Image: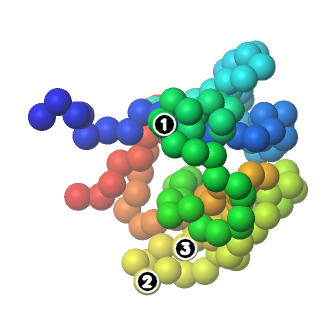
Amino acid sequence: MTVPARMSVVTLGYRDLATMRSFYERLGWKSRSDDDEFVRFEVGGGSLTMFPLHLLAGEANLPVAEPDGNFRGFTLAVVVERREMVDAAIADVERAGGRVLARPVDRDFGGYSGYFADPEDNVWEIVWAPGMSFDERGGLIWPE
């Protein structure tokens, strides 16, 4: 197989870099770029990057859709080490200016999670799941 089974980078197309960078920095994430168009955050063995939406769409040969508040068909997730960390993280998101979409609740799979949207309506889940652990870089290790 020529396509390795891994995800190294998630890139969010943005409309307003200053607002997006500021939101993630208020969460305590360190940006790794001083560029006026591109920003990178190191996230547990991978990277979350941001690039102008119109340029990203152009590279993918797609039109830029207008924001309409509809679900885009994907979520991003931050897995935390302990159940109580979900509530604390959601509170931090609110203080940083994120919009809580679903308060944390027990989930059918035995975990606990809540959802929020960043300033440009990218949907994130904060989740604790029994048996999950992390490697030395913060990469997620699924239970066997």
Q: Quadrant of residue 105?
A: bottom right
Q: Quadrant of residue 139?
A: top left
Question: Are the residues flagged by discs 1 and 3 in contact, CB closer than 8 Å?
Answer: no
Rendered location of residue 12, percent (x, y): 61, 41
Q: Is residue 87 visible?
A: no
* Residue that protrudes farthest toward the left in the picture: 1
- Which residue type carries mark 2? Asp
Q: Is residue 30 visible?
A: yes
Residue at image position (35%, 48%) is: 141
Residue carrying label 1: 61
Rendered location of residue 7, percent (x, y): 38, 39
- Which residue type carries mark 1? Asn
Residue at image position (42%, 33%) is: 8
Query: 64 left or right of 128?
Result: right
Residue 13 in the image: above or below residue 124: above
Question: Are the residues flagged by discs 1 and 2 in contact, CB closer than 8 Å?
Answer: no
Return the mark for residue 80. none
Rendered location of residue 6, percent (x, y): 32, 38
Instruction: Bin the neighbour count of mark 3 within 10 Å (Cα to Cα): few under 14, some 14-19, many 20 and up.
Output: many
Question: Are the residues flagged by discs 2 and 3 in contact, CB closer than 8 Å?
Answer: no
Q: Secondary structure at mark 2?
A: loop
Query: 140 left or right of 127?
Result: left
Q: Give the position of the C terminus as an image quadrant.
A: bottom left
Return the mark for residue 112. 3
Residue carrying label 2: 108
